[in-house]
Amino acid sequence: MNGSDIRSSTRDRANDPRRSPEEQRQSARDVRASRERGDDPRRERDASRPRLRDEEDRGSRDRAARPKLLNRERGIALRQSQLHALSEIGTFRTVDVKDLTRFAYQGNERGTREDLRYLEAQGLVKEKTLSNAYKQPRQIVTLTKEGDRLLRAIGDLPRDQETYHGFVKPREQDHDADLYKVYRRAVEEIEKDGGRVRKVRLDFELKTSLNRQHEAARRLPADLKEKFLESLAREHGLVVRNKKITVPDLQIEYETPDREILRENVELISRDYREAGIRAKADSGFKIYARSGDADRIRRALQDSGALTEVLSL
């Protein structure tokens, strides 16, 4: 019996002349109540049928691939992979396209290129070739102002996560473009121990916050200023060395399996760093990374100063 037969037979019972008027009215009320509840034998049969693993996986893939309309006025529709790319780029301001392919797209170069072409056509990202890079020219990408605005609007990141757009300081772009790779390396270790990343702070955010609060302490007596500085450093997950707070390239805030909130300060040291600067970063307890070509020189500089900091090669 199909659904129309069921509805027809229910209707016939409600209007059966052999039943008393009161019985017919009660039956009609029962039919209306059943419709309002949405009762449908076909739906019950479908609901009781267990979903196969293939169906669940296919449904998840379909939802991930289905574009989501984010801006009705401009008609911008983005897939989940494109939203994820915006989040990764916006968090670090400048990202090497090869690193984006490796980490965000699991090596799918074609998928990366297709998504970036679409995002650029929508005015959400822009690319450039960095010709004076460390070893060879590299392609880097950043958000546009519109891309940053859209990323903040959709709430695909933690509420207090800062995002950035636009290329800045050309002489630092090569260094900054490697921070995404450094972050990914550090997160591998955090997640291996069961940690979960909560947010990322770049040096710009840390310096802005420190300077804003430090300005209020300028007129304090020397002894109170020193205590204030120590308190300010602890509040930001940093330390005071030689009456100064040294700021890392990036800070990763994460939650341990025991629900403890910790911060890991990470620095990418390049060939331009002086030995005094290298020692200051190491003495502040930062996790030190270096490009493979710079790692040996940095290790020697730290050994000569007596620092026992490990230097991790990219």
Image: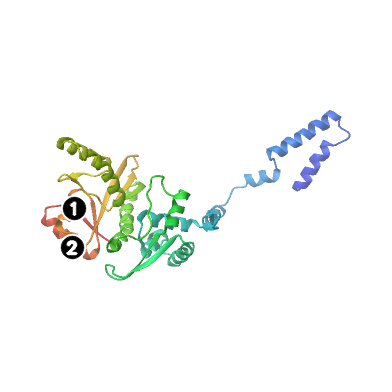
Q: Residues within 10 Å of mark 1 (few under 14, many from 20)?
A: some
Q: Residue 296 carries which label?
A: 2
The correct choice, above or below, for 184 with respect to 233 in the image is: below
Residue 293's spot in the image, x, y percent?
Answer: 22, 66
Residue 114's spot in the image, x, y percent?
Answer: 47, 66
- Quarter of the view holding residue 101: bottom left
The correct choice, above or below, for 254 with respect to 103 in the image is: above
Q: Does residue 81 appear to the left or right of 95 in the view shown?
A: right
Q: How many marks?
A: 2
Residue 153's spot in the image, x, y percent?
Answer: 47, 49
Mark 2 lies on a secondary structure that is helix
Check the picture and name the quadrant holding the C terminus.
Answer: bottom left
Pick the front one: 128 or 83: 128
Q: Residue at x 45, y 56 (%)?
A: 146
Residue for badge 1: 309
First along the sequence among labels 2 and 1: 2
Q: Three-letter amino acid code at disc 1?
A: Thr
Mark 1 lies on a secondary structure that is loop
Pick the front one: 148 or 299: 148
Q: How crowded is mark 2: few (under 14 residues within 10 Å), some or many (20 or more)?
A: some
Q: Which residue lies furthest to the front in this view?
A: 219
Cα–Cα gap, marks 2 and 1: 13 Å
Q: Is residue 55 visible?
A: yes
